[in-house]
Image (tube, grey):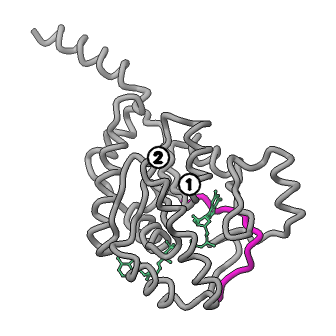
Amino acid sequence: MSEGPAQTGDASLGRRGLLLVLSSPSGAGKTTLSRRLLDVEGSQLSMSISVTTRPPRPGEVDGQDYWFVSESTFTEMREGGRLLEWAQVFGNLYGTPRDSVEAMLRTGHDVLFDIDWQGARQLAEKIAEDVVRVFVLPPTAAALAERLERRNQDSASVVAQRMAQAADEISHWDEYDYVIVNFDVEESLAELRAILLAERARRQRLKGLPDFVAKLHKDLGKAV
Ligand SMILES: Nc1nc2c(ncn2[C@@H]2O[C@H](COP(=O)(O)OP(=O)(O)O)[C@@H](O)[C@H]2O)c(=O)[nH]1
Ligand SMILES: Nc1ncnc2c1ncn2[C@@H]1O[C@H](COP(=O)(O)OP(=O)(O)O)[C@@H](O)[C@H]1O
């Protein structure tokens, strides 16, 4: 767990939780980076687990990677207002359950999202000031193809479909606050951590700051 002074300070200043959104073309590395970031951030950062109608890949666990649901369950959730955002990607439906995210934010936790540009846009429209959007780019087209193939969890036709969609996803890069070119996982992770650290220190997120400064003023007055 990261226990730097900024976080200790945050706690006493009553910081609001932020929504850290990672998007990228499929295969650029956002799942890898999300897992690493969650590992190093510990309880400060929680993952939003999406619901999806996509079938699980080998090794994927229900409730951990996604909540794997039927189309009728998804529609029921969407129509019942239980999704904060949703989108159709590669012919499957994906959505963010509202309750779990709101509960995490209420308790001051930051929440990490691995969602596409459509979802990022919806979140930014709804909760503008607490959303931080990061777009992950592959270093080259060849590297993207190689990563998709090496992951080896999708059929050749699914890999081809994802490559074909990459240009479309990438065309939304300028709707994001930050862009990371994922040459190297360790370097990209360091960049992500720096973004998170800086965003946590933003003045408008620190609810208790006016009281803190007022007290400081008062105490300074006494000291002279
Ligand atoms: N809008 C939205 N997109 C999602 C959600 N969950 C996953 N996605 C996106 O759906 C796309 C496909 O995800 P997935 O099938 O796991 O393949 P991946 O590209 O290897 O991550 C990725 O761009 C994800 O970021 C969600 O809840 N909402
Ligand atoms: N910087 C990197 N250099 C080399 N391989 C990487 C890098 N980042 C991720 N990968 C590999 O690329 C593949 C796709 O990564 P993944 O995180 O599943 O992408 P996404 O979630 O964006 O679809 C995985 O096999 C992963 O280990």
Element marked by disc 1: helix
Q: Position of residue 221 (x, y in %)?
A: 18, 8
Q: Position of residue 198 (x, y in %)?
A: 30, 45
Is 98 left, or right, of 199 in this rendering?
right
Asked whether 57 falls inside the magenta stretch, the response is yes
Q: Which mark is residue 117?
A: 1
Quarter of image, res 71: bottom right
Do tag 1 and tag 2 residues touch (Cβ < 8 Å)? Answer: yes
Question: Mark 1 or mark 2, which has the lower sequence index?
Answer: 1
Q: Quadrant of the N terminus?
A: bottom left
What residue is shown at x 52% (from left), y 69% (from top)?
A: 166
Q: Position of residue 111 (x, y in %)?
A: 52, 52
* Residue 34 in the image: above or below residue 85: below
- Residue marked by disc 2: 175
Q: Quadrant of the C terminus?
A: top left
Which quarter is ligand 2 in?
bottom left
Q: Nearer the viewer, residue 165 or 84?
A: 165
Q: Position of residue 79 (x, y in %)?
A: 86, 48
What residue is shown at x 24% (from left), y 18% (from top)?
A: 216
- Mark 2, Cα crowd under 10 Å, few <14 / some 14-19 / many 20+, is some
Beta carbon of the mark 1 residue lies under 8 A of ligand 1: no
Task: Count how many numbered circles sit on residues in the image.
Answer: 2
Amino acid type of disc 2? Answer: Glu
Amino acid type of disc 1? Answer: Trp
Magenta-colored span = 47-58
Quarter of image, res 199: top left
Quarter of image, res 182: bottom left
Q: CA distance from mark 1 to mark 2?
A: 8 Å
Element marked by disc 2: helix
Is 4 left, or right, of 143 in this rendering?
left
What residue is shown at x 66% (from left), y 79% (from top)?
A: 61
Is 127 left, or right, of 138 in this rendering?
right
